[in-house]
Image (tube, rainbow, N blue to C red):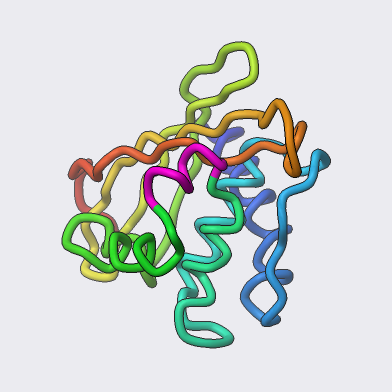
Amino acid sequence: MQFRRVFAFLILSLCVSTTASTAELIYPNPDIAPAEVIAIQLNGLQHNDSPETDAGIRQTWAFAHPRNRAMTGPLKRFTTMLKSPGYNVMLNHASNEIVPASSGEGWRQFDVFMETENGEVMLFAWIVEKVTDGRYKNCWMTVAVSAPRLAGRGS
């Protein structure tokens, strides 16, 4: 468990300096590992309105798998979904932890524990998949995020 926390912290640390302080988005590329994809998205959501309104939602959208975009898009619809009851706990959350859960050929599932602004800890199943063709070939991108489940109280 300690290794997982250190790993998640290191991944998140790599991403904090690149997404929270600049208006430029990070885009998928084959060098970004599955857990890094999630860390980039979570960092954006944690700092959603930095450096501008909904920058974190746009960062998250940048790593949405093409199949996911077809179901949840366009961006305006995706933004509305993230601001609706349930998923809105992701925006400006206090902290998060990424824990590997399961994997298969070309996909990885992680349990994401997210402490909300009010101290609840929510659990999400976050699934990324390697894109097999097109513009994002060989890039890891998010195919699904479960509805949140209460997992306890944080600090």
Q: Check the image and report above or below for 38 versus 27.
A: above
Drawn side of residue 112 relative to residue 60, left or right: left
Q: Is residue 140 left or right of residue 49?
A: right
| Residue that appears at 37% across and 34% down | 125
Residue at the spot 42% in from the left edge and 60% down from the top edge: 95
State how many labels appear: 0
* Left or right, 17 with reference to 113: right
Residue 155 point in image, percent of width and height = 29, 61
Displayed quadrant of residue 103:
top right
Most distant residue in the bottom direction = 52
From this view, report whether residue 49 is shown above or below residue 16. Answer: below
| Residue situated furthest right in the rendering | 31
Point out residue 61 in the picture as x, y percentages from the top left corner: 52, 58
Instruction: Look at the magenta stretch and give its main secondary structure.
Output: helix
**Stretch in magenta:** 65-72
| Residue that appears at 63% across and 12% down | 105
Q: 7 or 132: nearer the eye? A: 132
Asked whether the viewer can see residue 68, the reply is yes
The front one of 9 and 112 is 112
Q: Is residue 93 visible?
A: no
- Most extreme residue toward the top is 105
Q: Position of residue 135 (x, y in %)?
A: 75, 43
Residue visible at 41% across and 34% down in the picture: 111
121 w.r.t. 30: above or below:
below
Find residue 81 and report its image quarter: bottom left
